[in-house]
């Protein structure tokens, strides 16, 4: 398939329209007679809601007003649990929780209405830190503020830790919340019609999640609920679960108003109300031999889930599985807990728990290396998994991996040994304010849903042949800036043997596309791309079986194909190929024991960061960044490199710039002027390299979207440690925090 | 846009006099480049009311040079400042402040008059203007007056500008151009050093800003002027710190000046930084600048 489109950097399909401003996002759209919705929210973290008063001076009779009693179905956000209401009814559990919905024909009047609503509240004690939640003096969820706990173990950790021949190293590592900061804030337009049901258009990642939420709320047959994705300006996980809330709110307002309702969040509302990355704390206790061999790991991983359970158990599970990294270790015990607090619920964000636990482990390995006087790269190399060995949860690595080659390539590209020596010489001799350092992280990222998730999803994708001989991709996977449209077209064009121009990728619309699953977990190219290849092959087979197309899988003359389709459609209503997910053979996950084949495939990586630290200001500049990974077959090298570069930049933000300041449970810096994401000039040259696939040139593609979020933060902090000798253990590490770490190291 | 635009009235005169008439009536505010006002509008924090857009008033534009001074119209943008050849030579700290403000779009639209009138303690041009001894020219129906900029800021977001007054011009008295660093230390001449420690490298609000002008004669500080951002409720004209330098050999005065500066700054904790960090960094950066000048090094710019 050398001559195909897969493996080539064909241009992004929607790129031109986005760059020239032609793309219409949800807030650019308008429906006849459309009203504008707003959400009245709680100003406090926790309270009993005694009443809602509509203030003076507003023509309330012109408004549609929806409270908990005006919902057509259960007052529940349909996710894993049913604890989260669409509108708080008696108890408010976090700041900016939705309480009342208003719609008015005039947007400014809707806003005036929002300002005139008064909530009568009786304050209740809130839980605004992990420590308070664990202490349990105030219980905000269940009996002990614990949403979910997983435990898994292999070997005999306690005995290994007690072995007199090992060194035991302990450490606690913390990560902060992070805002996705997609460029387009969230928004929806809903229509309601007693006969036709509910239609919602908006900015979202997962059309069928929104669909399921609306079916449950309106208690309608699935065909009477339609969800259409509009051009979406980024998601990063932030548009995984929360769009269901906005869609439901817009739809109940549309039902009440008798008009379509547009509900758009501005930046401040979006940052305050929608989900962010879970903050975490990890406690490591590790037994290691003096030569650096890992003997036992005892890991306690905690994430702050916020006020409702939402997706926290799955974030927790991914974090736990990644917490022991791509290393061989005989004795491993993992305890993982998702904790309830009075923060707005934390949720999906690129990496989904793994970046947090990878940060902790990689940071801990550097602490171990320093304790033993070993080169951090050598310590990692010594312990990297080999083919046939087991991960911490007992998954046997069947792929012929060679992780040392990935690490070596990253070390070579970054001139690790030379630069390490040069930086040390510089730091010893300088009397100026600058210090230099270099750091590495090695890690893996499991792609697709965790455990049996993909089996439960049972995704379906279709390809439809049109009369003009073109193919239309029918999948619910959304283009959110990552390249879905382009990559799908490449895969289908090759499978069909047709030019790229003959493949169209339809707009995800639940009235038209099957449920190919959510656009999350780095699964789109890997899982849905594979389904599309199979669906296309099946469509070709149909034409072949009908005697309309010659045998073979190579290129087809487009004219021949068009005629074949035309002839087929003369006798048939439609021509479609379909494929349904099938798990790779021999894959099994035991959720109860928390052991087994956690993921169908893993991407493997080694990242190196080179930094300068300014001792006057405690500022850190990342001077150079090397990102080497094995991700199977790369479908579109430019788009793939873009995913890595973007992920590294986002992770630099998480490590060095982005601090969600919660004050009494409310985000105090909800604007781009005070929630600081890195700009292009804060981002180093990022040198991306993809290794030849371990399974050869025809290897399947692995997920890559989340991988680059895992490695940069620990690599950067390792470099800061190398530069200064201080041992930072928490991110975000803004200059304010590093200044303190440096001061403590001095005294 | 969530703000209710129907509750805002905006007029766009071309004549300076019409602006002054409106301001004299009371109830009107000035809108220049809008780069501060639009942010507050977006956050629903801009009071609805009446605004005079002065963007088309040509009398408020342009940079003129005489033997004694460079005079900049209030609508002078950051881009205008950076392009001006004489400002580059004689007032490099102002040029650097302009270069480090926002990014290209803001630099094309944001004005000096707006930066001064907005009176944010974090603003970037005030430290340079303070160190350069700038003079403001205020116009109103009642007449024209000139004020030393160092007296202008009286408290957090408080200034000597009356509601009927427009900032029309900013005047920089011309002095000797700054000298290049000399091996063994500058002993004679003028040295300028500007520093901005921001939240990131562009589009950043200063956590600490510093503009230092020293006039040296035979290694002795003949004159010193220091402006600072984000370390006090107002753009700070650090008189005590400057006094600790004046009349003493630079090398001997550094620690006293740095200690005075530590006492003179009164930073706060907010979402962008902490008082502790701001004080420490202000002190570190001042020490670094003075030590570099004294040693004849080009101070190593912060990252
Ligand atoms: C993205 C972004 C980045 C920014 N970065 C920086 C930065 O790095 N450094 C920095 O210092 N600032 C920064 N700013 C703030 C802003 O750009 C500057 O303060 C700018 O100089 C304001 O000028 P303006 O003409 O746009 O003011 P406007 O917004 O038009 O007005 C600001 C205030 O000044 C008053 N005013 C304006 N002109 C006059 C006048 N001639 N007489 C009397 N009153 C007047 C107005 O009534 C208003 O109160 C940034 C702003 C944005 C949006």
Image (cartoon, coloured by chain):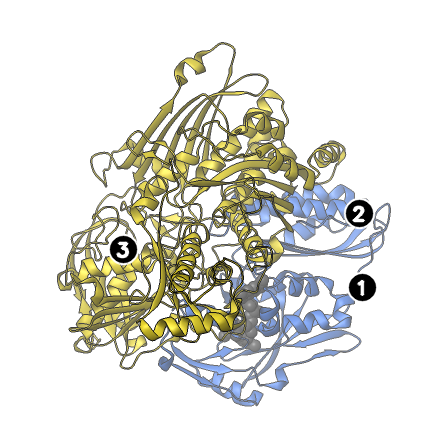
Chain colours: A yellow, B blue
The residue drawn where x is 25% and y is 64% is A249
In which quadrant of the rendered view does residue A532 lie?
A: bottom left
Q: Where residue A719 is drawn, which disc sits there?
A: none
Look at the image and tell me whether residue A641 can be seen: yes
In which quadrant of the rendered view does residue A642 lie?
A: bottom right
Label pair 3/1, CB-CB below 8 angstroms: no
Q: Which residue is mark 1?
A: B177
The residue drawn where x is 57% and y is 85% is B56
Q: Of residues B268 and B45, which is closer to you in this image?
A: B45
Crowd around label 3: few <14 · some 14–19 · many ≥20 (10 Å): many
Circle 2 — which element? loop
Mark 3 on the same chain as mark 1? no
Between marks 2 and 1, how big is the CA–CA gap? Answer: 18 Å
Q: Of residues A715 and B216, which is closer to you in this image?
A: A715
- Quadrant of the displayed image that contains ligand 1: bottom right
Counting every numbered tag in the picture gives 3
Crowd around label 1: few <14 · some 14–19 · many ≥20 (10 Å): some
Q: Which residue is mark 3?
A: A97
Q: Of residues A447 and B42, which is closer to you in this image?
A: A447
Circle 1 — which element? loop
Q: Position of residue A719 (x, y in %)?
A: 62, 37
Mark 3 on the same chain as mark 2? no
Residue furthest out toward the top: A164
Between marks 3 and 1, how big is the CA–CA gap? Answer: 59 Å
Q: Position of residue A84 (x, y in %)?
A: 23, 50
Between marks 3 and 2, how big is the CA–CA gap? Answer: 56 Å
Q: Which residue is mark 2?
A: B297
Looking at marks 2 and 1 on the same chain, the residue that comes earlier in the sequence is marked by 1
């Amino acid at each position: 398939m050398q001559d195909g489109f897969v493996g080539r950097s064909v241009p992004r399909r929607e790129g031109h329209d986005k760059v020239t401003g032609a793309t219409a996002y949800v807030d650019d759209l308008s429906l006849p007679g459309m009203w504008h919705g707003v959400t009245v929210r709680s100003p406090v973290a926790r309270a009993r809601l005694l009443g809602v008063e509509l203030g003076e001076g507003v023509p309330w009779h012109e408004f549609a007003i929806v409270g908990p009693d005006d919902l057509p179905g259960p007052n529940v956000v349909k996710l894993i649990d049913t604890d989260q209401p669409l509108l708080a009814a008696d108890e408010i559990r976090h700041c900016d929780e939705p309480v009342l919905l208003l719609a008015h024909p005039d947007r400014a009047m809707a806003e005036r209405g929002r300002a005139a609503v008064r909530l009568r509240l009786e304050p209740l004690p809130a839980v605004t830190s992990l420590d308070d939640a664990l202490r349990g003096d105030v219980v905000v969820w269940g009996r002990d503020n614990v949403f979910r706990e997983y435990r898994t173990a292999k070997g005999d950790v306690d005995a290994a830790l007690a072995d007199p021949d090992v060194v035991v190293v302990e450490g606690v590592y913390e990560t902060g919340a992070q805002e996705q900061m997609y460029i387009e804030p969230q928004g929806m337009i809903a229509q309601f019609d007693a006969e036709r049901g509910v239609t919602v258009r908006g900015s979202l990642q997962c059309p069928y999640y929104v669909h399921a939420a609306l079916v449950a709320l309106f208690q309608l047959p699935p065909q009477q609920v339609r969800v259409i994705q509009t051009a979406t300006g980024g998601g990063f996980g932030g548009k995984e679960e929360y769009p269901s809330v906005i869609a439901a709110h817009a739809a109940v307002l549309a039902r009440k108003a008798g008009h379509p309702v547009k509900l758009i969040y501005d930046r401040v509302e979006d940052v305050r109300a929608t989900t962010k990355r879970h903050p975490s704390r990890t406690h490591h206790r590790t037994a290691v031999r003096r030569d650096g061999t890992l003997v036992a790991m005892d890991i306690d991983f905690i994430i702050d889930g916020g006020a409702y359970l939402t997706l926290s158990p799955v974030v927790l599970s991914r974090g736990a599985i990644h917490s022991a990294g791509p290393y061989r270790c005989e004795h491993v015990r993992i305890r993982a807990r998702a904790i309830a607090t009075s923060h707005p619920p934390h949720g999906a964000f690129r990496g989904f728990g793994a970046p947090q636990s990878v940060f902790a482990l990689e940071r801990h390995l550097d602490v171990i290396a320093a304790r033993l006087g070993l080169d951090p790269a050598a310590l990692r190399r010594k312990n990297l998994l080999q083919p046939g060995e087991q991960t911490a949860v007992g998954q046997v690595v069947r792929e012929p991996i060679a992780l040392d080659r990935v690490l070596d390539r990253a070390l070579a590209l970054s001139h690790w040994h030379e630069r390490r020596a040069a930086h040390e010489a510089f730091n010893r001799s300088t009397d100026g304010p600058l210090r230099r350092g270099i750091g590495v992280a090695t890690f893996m990222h499991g792609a697709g849903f965790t455990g049996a998730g993909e089996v439960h999803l049972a995704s379906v994708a279709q390809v439809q042949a049109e009369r003009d001989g073109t193919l239309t991709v029918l999948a619910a996977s959304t283009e959110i800036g990552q390249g879905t449209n382009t990559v799908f077209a490449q895969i289908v064009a090759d499978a069909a043997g047709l030019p790229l121009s003959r493949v169209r990728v339809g707009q995800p619309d639940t009235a038209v596309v099957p449920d190919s699953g959510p656009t999350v977990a780095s699964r789109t190219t890997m899982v849905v791309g594979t389904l599309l290849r199979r669906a296309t092959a099946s469509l070709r087979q149909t034409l072949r079986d009908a005697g309309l197309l010659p045998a073979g899988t190579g290129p087809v003359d487009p004219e021949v194909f068009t005629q074949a389709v035309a002839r087929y459609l003369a006798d048939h209503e439609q021509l479609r190929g379909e494929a349904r997910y099938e798990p790779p053979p021999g894959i099994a996950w035991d959720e109860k024991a928390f052991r087994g084949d956690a993921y169908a495939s893993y991407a493997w990586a080694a990242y190196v960061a080179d930094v300068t630290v300014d001792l006057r200001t405690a500022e850190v500049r990342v001077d150079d960044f090397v990102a080497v990974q094995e991700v199977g077959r790369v479908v579109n090298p430019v788009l793939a490199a873009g995913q890595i570069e973007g992920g590294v930049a986002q992770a630099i933000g998480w490590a060095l710039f982005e601090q969600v300041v919660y004050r009494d449970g409310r985000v105090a810096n909800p604007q781009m002027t005070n929630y600081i994401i890195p700009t292009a000039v804060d981002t180093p040259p990022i040198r991306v390299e993809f290794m030849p696939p371990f399974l050869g040139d025809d290897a399947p593609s692995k997920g890559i979207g989340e991988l680059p979020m895992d490695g940069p933060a620990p690599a950067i902090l390792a470099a800061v440690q190398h530069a200064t000798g201080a041992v930072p253990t928490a991110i975000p590490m803004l200059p304010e925090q590093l200044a303190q770490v440096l001061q403590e190291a001095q005294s | 846009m969530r703000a209710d635009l129907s509750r805002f009235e905006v007029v766009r005169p071309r004549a300076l006099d019409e602006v002054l008439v409106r301001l004299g009536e009371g109830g009107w505010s000035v809108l220049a480049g809008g780069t501060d006002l639009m942010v507050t509008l977006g956050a629903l924090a801009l009071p609805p009311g009446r605004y005079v857009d002065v963007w088309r008033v040509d009398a408020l534009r342009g940079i003129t040079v005489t033997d004694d001074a460079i005079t900049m119209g209030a609508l002078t943008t950051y881009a205008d400042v950076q392009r001006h050849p004489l400002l580059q030579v004689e007032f490099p700290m102002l040029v650097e402040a302009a270069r480090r403000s926002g990014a290209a779009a803001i630099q094309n639209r944001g004005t000096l008059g707006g930066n001064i009138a907005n009176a944010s303690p974090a603003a970037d041009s005030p430290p340079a203007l303070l160190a350069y001894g700038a003079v403001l020219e205020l116009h109103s129906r009642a007449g024209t007056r000139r004020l030393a900029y160092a007296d202008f800021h009286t408290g957090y977001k408080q200034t000597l500008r009356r509601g009927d007054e427009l900032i029309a011009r900013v005047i920089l008295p011309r002095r000797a151009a700054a000298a290049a660093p000399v091996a063994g230390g500058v002993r004679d001449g003028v040295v300028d050093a500007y520093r901005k420690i921001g939240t990131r490298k562009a589009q950043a609000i200063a956590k600490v800003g510093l503009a230092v002008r020293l006039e040296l004669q035979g290694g002795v500080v003949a004159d010193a002027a220091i402006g600072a951002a984000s370390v006090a409720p107002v753009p700070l004209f650090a008189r005590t710190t400057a006094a600790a330098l004046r009349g003493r050999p630079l090398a001997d005065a550094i620690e006293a000046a740095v200690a005075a500066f530590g006492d003179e700054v009164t930073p706060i904790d907010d979402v962008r930084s902490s008082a502790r960090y701001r004080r420490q960094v202000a002190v570190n950066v001042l020490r670094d600048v003075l030590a570099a000048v004294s040693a004849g090094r080009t101070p190593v710019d912060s990252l």
